[in-house]
Amino acid sequence: MEFRERQEREPKAFSHYEMLERVGERILGKVYKGWHKANGLIVALQETQVLQCFSREVEMLMALVHPNVMQLIEYFMHGLHLVLVLEYLPMNL
């Protein structure tokens, strides 16, 4: 298991992404297939109503690199919702 070096990240916004389709719903929120408008990366966007108290855990997940763990690319707040930008896997678990 590897950890990436923590980098200062500029918060992103939905304006950087286009939501293509809703692909599911999980306990923590809805999941959408989307793409980053600047670099074309296909991602999964998970919108959740979890409070910001999870920010430390989210930062730790962003640093985690493992082939059996879906990559957390970034996160940002959208109103009262926390949005997770995840590696897109074209399958349903």
Image (tube, helix red, strand yellow):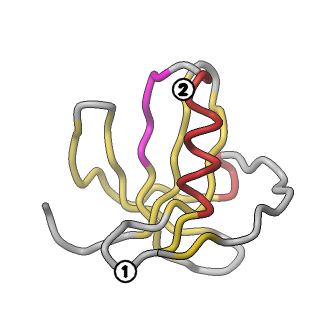
Q: How many marks?
A: 2
Mark closest to the chain's N terminus, 1 or 2: 1
Q: Which residue is more in the foreground, 56 or 71?
A: 56
Tell me if 23 is positioned left or right of 57 in this view: left
Expressed as whole percent of the image width and height from the top left, the position of residue 4 reads 67, 72
Callout 2: SS:
strand
Expressed as whole percent of the image width and height from the top left, the position of residue 2 reads 55, 76
Q: Which residue is more in the foreground, 47 or 3?
A: 3
| Residue at figure coordinates x 62%, y 63% from the top left | 63
Amino acid type, mark 2: His
- Stretch in magenta: 46-50
Marks 1 and 2 close (CB-CB < 8 Å)? no
* Other-residue count near label 2 (Cα within 10 Å), few / some / many at <14 / 14–19 / ≥20: some
Expressed as whole percent of the image width and height from the top left, the position of residue 29 reads 33, 33
Instruction: In the rendered structure, find residue 81 and report the number of the disc placed on it.
Output: 2
Q: Residue furthest left?
A: 93
| Residue at figure coordinates x 44%, y 37% from the top left | 47
Give the main secondary structure of the magenta stretch.
strand
Tell me if 21 is positioned left or right of 27 in this view: right
Q: Residue furthest front?
A: 1
Tell me if 12 is positioned left or right of 67 in this view: right
Callout 1: SS:
loop
Q: Quadrant of residue 73?
A: bottom right
* Other-residue count near label 1 (Cα within 10 Å), few / some / many at <14 / 14–19 / ≥20: few
What residue is disc 1 on? 67
| Residue at figure coordinates x 17%, y 71% from the top left | 91
Amino acid type, mark 1: Pro
Expressed as whole percent of the image width and height from the top left, the position of residue 81 reads 54, 26
Q: Is residue 13 magenta?
A: no
Mark whose residue sits in front, 1 or 2: 1
Q: Quadrant of residue 92?
A: bottom left
Query: In which quadrant is the C terminus drawn?
Result: bottom left
